[in-house]
Image (cartoon, grey):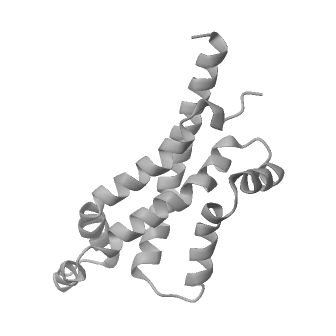
Amino acid sequence: MSPDAISALWLSLKVSMAATALVALIGIPIAYLLARRRFWGHAVLDTLVTLPLILPPTVTGYYLIVLLGRLLQLTATVMALPLLVRTAAAAIASVDRELEKAAFTLGRSEWRTAIEITLPLARNGILAGLVLAFAPMCQPDSVTTK
């Protein structure tokens, strides 16, 4: 492998890992909200999260570069966020609400119930969402080296 190819691969891996971490920090709480809450603006948030999946990647990428400049991690995060949120929200929604209700009757707060019951039971779906978010970003041609 040439030094340029190794450099491109290394840059791609760094950006992918950073973006996946950022997607997890932002996406899992959004997925929880979309799966477990009904609130004013629910449809707007759902639409905003889904928008990068609907728009052609070149359009989304162009507007992100115009708005954000060369912040590669943030651009990659916006593109990967819907993949994690959709998968994690489905996994969280599939957790039996009766288990959460049982935790509430035992005095657990919603926060502790989410951390101790809901998210561990949705773990496989969340991990699948993280893999789906990471995989497309981890390609040398997905990141510019200029």
Viewer-closest of 139 and 98: 139
Viewer-closest of 105 and 91: 91
* Residue 143, horizontal then vertical, whole percent: 66, 35
Q: Is residue 65 above or below residue 83?
A: above
Q: Is residue 95 above or below residue 61?
A: below
Given the current orientation, which residue lies at the most extreme right position? 66
Which image quarter: residue 19? Answer: top right
Viewer-closest of 80 and 112: 80
- Residue at left 23%, top 68%? 117
Q: Is residue 74 above or below residue 98?
A: above
- Residue at left 55%, top 83%? 42
Q: How many marks?
A: 0
- Residue at left 48%, top 64%? 85
* Residue 51, horizontal then vertical, whole percent: 64, 67
Q: Quadrant of the C terminus?
A: top right
The answer to whether residue 96 is left or right of residue 15 is left
The answer to whether residue 140 is left or right of residue 23 is right
